Every structure is written in C-alpha cells, then in structure tokens.
Image (cartoon, grey):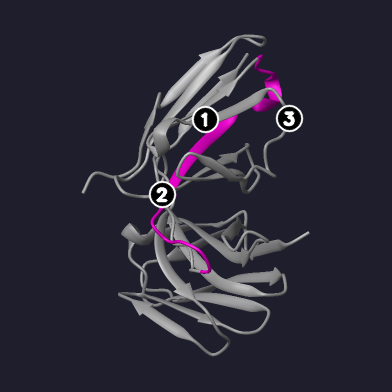
Amino acid sequence: EDQVTQSPEALRLQEGESSSLNCSYTVSGLRGLFWYRQDPGKGPEFLFTLYSAGEEKEKERLKATLTKKESFLHITAPKPEDSATYLCAHGVMNSGGYQKVTFGTGTKLQVIP
Amino acid sequence: EAGVTQFPSHSVIEKGQTVTLRCDPISGHDNLYWYRRVMGKEIKFLLHFVKESKQDESGMPNNRFLAERTGGTYSTLKVQPAELEDSGVYFCASSDRGLFRANVLTFGAGSRLTVL
C-alpha cells in the first residue's frame, strides 16, 4: 500500500530558529508531491506541488524540495504565525486516469515568540 | 470566489442514529472528494466524484456509508446506522483538474462527527 511518512510528529521552535520537516513516500509512479498547511478547526490549505527530483519551490519563509524518495519543507526564521500542522501528500494516477491523493499524518509545528 | 462549504460543522449523535453531512464545492469544480480524519490518524480518502458519477469509492469503509452527488453540484454523505468508530472529522474537497492532471485540492473546514 502507498505510504507517506512524516517526521517529526511535533516540533517546537523558537522564533527565528530554522528547521526542516521530512516527508518520505513509498510509491511508484509519483505524479505530484504536495504540501498543505492546516490550522486548528480548518481544512488543509494548499502550499506547494513538486513533480520531479531536484525541484524546489518557495513561498515567504517556506521552501519545499524533492528527491526520489523524500521531500523536505524548510522553514527559515519562523514566526509564531507559522505555527500549524504541515501535511505532506502524494498523488498517483489511478486506472481511470484521475489522481488519487494520499496524506501523511502531519507535523505539528509550534513557534514560540 | 466562495470556497468549499460543509455543514454541519459539528454533529453529536447516539450510536445507531443516522447523520447526513453536506458539501457544497466551488462552483464549476467537477471533482469532489470526501476524506476522513480519525483521532491521531492521517486524513484518509473515502471517495471521488466526477460530476455526478462515483469515479473511485475504494476508501468507503463499509455499506453504512452512502455518498451522493445530486446533479453534479452538492454532495451528501450519510452514515446509517452510526457506530462509535465513525467519530472523526469529515473533509470535503473539490478541484477543477481533469484527466492526467495534478490535483490541487481545495478543502472545506470539515464536519466533526461525534458518536456517543
């Protein structure tokens, strides 16, 4: 079965303390690696899509990178408003030609002022 | 643009009762998905509609769950009869991507179901 594993489960950082979140996946035929952010009481909010190894995307203090088996979400000089659960997901085409998206359990990030 | 709307936001029912969750996707989005997050677990796929047709229902846990999408617009997910293990947050998502396209999902805020 396709799997997405995220680590760590929880991460506590001081404001300004950079770090990285890890996402590893076991699937062949990857058609997109996604990062979402989820705030309490809300649905996941799309951040990035990565398609091929070596690809990088950035948005403010966040940068996502992709290798053949892993993706990293780098957070540079985080602020308290970056506190959220970050979800990794992969997309694989099903037999009908539509993409099925499978999520990991997420990393809960807390940034302390 | 209005987002994905789900209701109720929270439902508390007794074991054996019936609950119906509703999702209104973004207007024009042919793809509608239901996902569920049980406490401490990952968000799991339940099923996928393309317009009014079920394209993939491989994640539906059992026949107590019935999903419909009337006229390719809003969708309902009925649980009948509800069991304790059905408790969790049910998310709906929609997308406008078609065949062989990467699928960025727009999620609703979720419907929290508590079965006592």
On the image, numbered disc 2 is attached to which residue? B30
Against B9, residue A101 (above or below) is below
Which residue is under mark 3? B62
Name the secondary structure under disc 3.
Answer: loop
Judge by depth and name the residue closer to the eye, B57 or A25: B57
Q: Residue at x 51, y 64 (%)?
A: B99
Q: Position of residue B17 (x, y in %)?
A: 61, 9
Q: Label 1 sits on what residue type?
A: Glu
Q: Is residue A80 left or right of residue B101?
A: left
Magenta residue span: B81-100
The quadrant of the image that shows the N terminus of chain A is bottom right
Q: Chain of mark 1?
A: B
Secondary structure type for disc 1 = strand
Which of these two is toward me, A103 or A39?
A103
Query: Does residue A7 appear anywhere in the picture?
Result: no
**Mark 1 vs mark 2, CA separation in Å:** 14 Å
